[in-house]
Amino acid sequence: MKKKHILTVLICAAVLLSAALMTGYWNEKTVSRALVVGFVYSEDESTPYTANFVQAQRRLEEEFGDKVKILTRSNVLSDDAERPMQELVREGCRIIFINMDTDIPVTLAMEHPEVEFCQISMPDITLEGTTENYHTFNGEIYQARYVSGIIAGMKLRELLDTGELLPREALVGYVGANSSTEVISGYTAFFLGVQSVAPESVMKVRYTGSWSNFSAEKEETRKLIDEGCVIIAQHVNTMAPAIVCEEASAAGKTVYHVGYHQGMMDVAPSCALVSIRTNWSPYVLEAVQAVMNKQNIEKSVKANVHGRDLSAGFESGWVELLDLNDTIAAYGSQEKAEKAIDSLKKGKTKVFYGNYTGVNPRNSSDTIDLNTEFIENQNSSNPSFSYILDRVIQVEN
């Protein structure tokens, strides 16, 4: 009996050991089959810009589970971008997403044809001379800016119709990072949305000189409020404009805010009208799926194709409205916004169109007449409208 007992114990031990080894084998096999995906961020989650992009990273983790292994590098400086990207390549990344302005990915794509480099489109980076594994992408954010402008215009219309504002007081302010085409296109689309409801309005623009400078954003926002602006929108990366608007509102001033990258109701509950954002998730998920399936990214992602450059708007969920504040928004704002979004999805709305003329601030001989429609993002995911509208838009710095 003793021998039988020993034999039984040995057999059980062998079975358990075999099971453990097989489990380890399959775990190792599962890990080895996981697609390694890299993300390179110019900032970290403390800034709305990168926090918005991290949402796509987390959505990828939720959707794909152990089919992917995620590696990230945050607070990457443009002049030191090669080192962290090379690290991601060495650690096995097959696709790397980059949300910063640097031409390093173009060079690395040539050196590492086995890796797909996917970068948010930048004005100084073109596809000319790049390799097949280098890609660019961006949301057609002008669509969301236009609709948020309609919501802002609805609020102005309400204030004008109730007599709280005189027509000459229908001033809109805009805090932008710089005079880049991206910023000009954005504030023009926003203001044309405002004008579609409140044609009495004019807009003042102030630049901070940086995408993320909390103190500069606060300073320029205060100046716009002191100059009489009652709506403030932003194309900068922090919550500073919303915070300043909330402070001014608490002090008794009439001012409302339109945010970017994330909802602002937590920091500006009494004046945040609405926010907008680019939703990076559709591109990230579909590009990763394409690599998994060994398919071409541009043929797999549902978007407008410009070579190896992709863009999309409301129709593909690439841009969104966030946190429409029903407690302060003008009556009918939700319905008006939904109607505008539906029209944009169907390609029926002409945004850059109307009885306006404009001048390129970098070349005074380059002018435009919007009685002929300008179609944004027609040839590129990077914005291309770069004219300041005469009479109705004034740049203060």
Image (cartoon, rainbow, N blue to C red):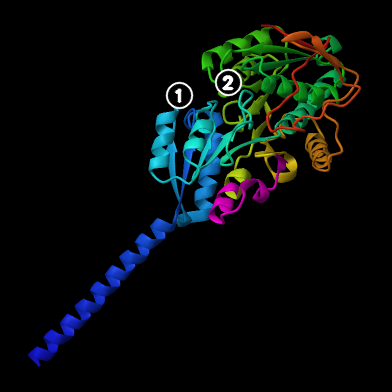
* The label number, if any, that marks residue 243 in the structure image: 2
> In the rendered view, would you say 198 is above or below 9?
above
Regarding residue 378, the answer to whether it shows in the image is yes
For image coordinates 54% across by 20% down, the residue present is: 212
In front of the other: label 1 or label 2?
Answer: 1
Q: Is residue 303 a member of the stretch shown in magenta?
A: yes
320 left or right, relative to 376: left
Span highlighted in magenta in the image: 287-306
For image coordinates 87% across by 25% down, the residue present is: 353
Residue 72 image position (x, y, % from top left):
44, 39
Q: Amino acid at mark 2?
A: Ile
For image coordinates 41% across by 61% down, the residue present is: 30
19 left or right, relative to 394: left
Other-residue count near label 1 (Cα within 10 Å), few / some / many at <14 / 14–19 / ≥20: some
Q: Residue furthest left?
A: 2
- Which quarter of the picture shows residue 219? top right
**Residue tagged 1:** 77
**First of labels 1, 2 by sequence position:** 1
